[in-house]
Image (cartoon, grey):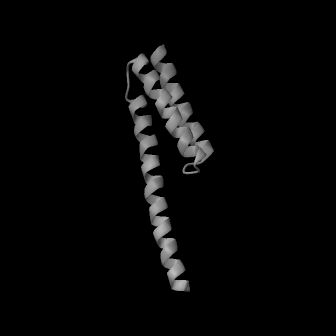
Amino acid sequence: MSAKGTVLKRVRQSRKANAINKHYKSVAKTATKKVLNETNVENATKAASSAFSSIDKVASKGIIHKNKAANQKARISKHLKSLSK
């Protein structure tokens, strides 16, 4: 394979990976927003469990940093705590 061919292949691979990563990030952000916009404790708790799992999945794949995942989960937990008061 020529040098030009490997460059083009790399571009194809990175675009594909970028699209996949963007999808997973979007899923995690949407799940987080659903929890933070919820005012009912029971609904927020259900949404939080799915948000936690999607955030963990994204972090385990290396799409977001583990500290960012921890910060997002802490933000959700803080919101849940404020609702239960």
Q: For the point 44% across and 35% down, which residue is it?
A: 32
Q: Is residue 43 above or below residue 76?
A: above
Q: Is residue 31 above or below residue 9?
A: above
The percent coordinates of residue 49 (x first, y second) are 50, 27
Q: Is residue 19 above or below residue 9?
A: above
Q: For the point 52% across and 39% down, which residue is it?
A: 55
In the displayed image of the protein, which residue is found farthest to the top?
85
Residue in the foreground of this view, choosing between 70 and 18:
18
Q: How many marks?
A: 0
The percent coordinates of residue 13 (x first, y second) are 49, 67
Q: Quadrant of the N terminus?
A: bottom right
The percent coordinates of residue 8 (x first, y second) are 48, 77
Q: For the point 54% across and 51% down, which residue is it?
A: 63
Residue 37 falls in which quadrant of the image?
A: top left
Image-based side of 75 in relation to 36, left or right: right
Q: Is residue 75 above or below residue 43?
A: below
Residue in the foreground of this view, choosing between 32 and 18:
18
In the displayed image of the protein, which residue is found farthest to the front?
1
Q: For the point 54% across and 79% down, which residue is it?
A: 6
The percent coordinates of residue 46 (x first, y second) are 44, 23
